[in-house]
Image (cartoon, rainbow, N blue to C red):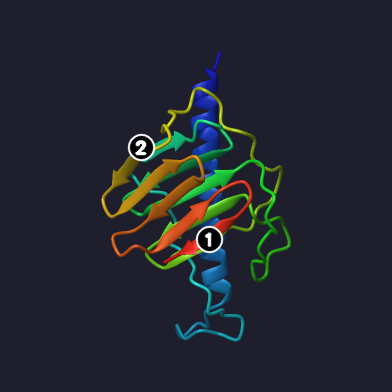
Amino acid sequence: MTSPRTIRTLMIVDAVLVVAFLVLLVVTLATRPDGEPGAGATSSPTPTATATSEPADEFRLPSGNIACAVSSDGVTCTIARYTYAAPEVAGCTGRTGHVLTLGPDGVAFACEEGPAPTAAGSDVRTLEYGSQTRVDDYTCKSGTDGVTCTDADGVGFRLARASWTELP
């Protein structure tokens, strides 16, 4: 029998791979064969995929509503329940608002297909309020006001149930 921790880890890996696929699809569709941006290109930053061969530091906030994976390539956070207005993602026919990423190209919400994520279980490591974790240039801090994730230049986001903010 597969443990709940293994299932949750596989679900996170699947979510990261889906985000990577969607980013590659958007980049492919928005670029002409000669490499120049096409008419479908947007000025919004598209983060690089966070899937790597290196292990990610995965955690949840004490509420379980927000869970993140931090790697040397970036950050992917999911939020199960939120009350802010879902952001628009160009070309997205699915749902937005649950998956927020930070990579070398900036901050972006992912276009999601399928069911919304659920609250992280107790099998995911808890990053206590006031604590932080860092992988290379990416740092995430847990607070009672949500999670704040930034790169070495201070670019990033603050994510909470009621709002999200792009930083700086």
Task: Say which mark, if any, is on residue 131.
Answer: 2
> Alpha-carbon distance for marks 1 and 2?
20 Å
Q: Residue at x 46, y 86 (%)?
A: 34
- 72 and 150: which one is in front? 150
**Label 1, on which residue?**
165
- Seen from the viewer's position, the closer of residues 133 and 145 is 145
- Assess disc 2: are there few (<14), some (14-19) or many (≥20) residues with their C-alpha within 10 Å of its C-alpha: few
Counting from the top left corner in percent of width and height, residue 55 is at 34, 39
Sequence-first tag of 1 and 2: 2
Q: 47 or 98, which is in the foreground? A: 98
**Residue 105's disc number:** none
As shown in the figure, which amino acid type bears the numbered disc 2? Ser
Q: Position of residue 109 (x, y in %)?
A: 57, 59
What residue do we see at 56% from left, 48% from top? 160
For the C terminus, the image quarter is: bottom left
Q: Would residue 149 be found to the left or right of residue 43 on screen?
A: left
Residue at 38% in and 47% down: 140
Q: x and y percent of residue 16 in the render? A: 50, 47
Name the residue rendered at 64%, 66% in the picture.
89
The percent coordinates of residue 36 (x first, y second) are 47, 86
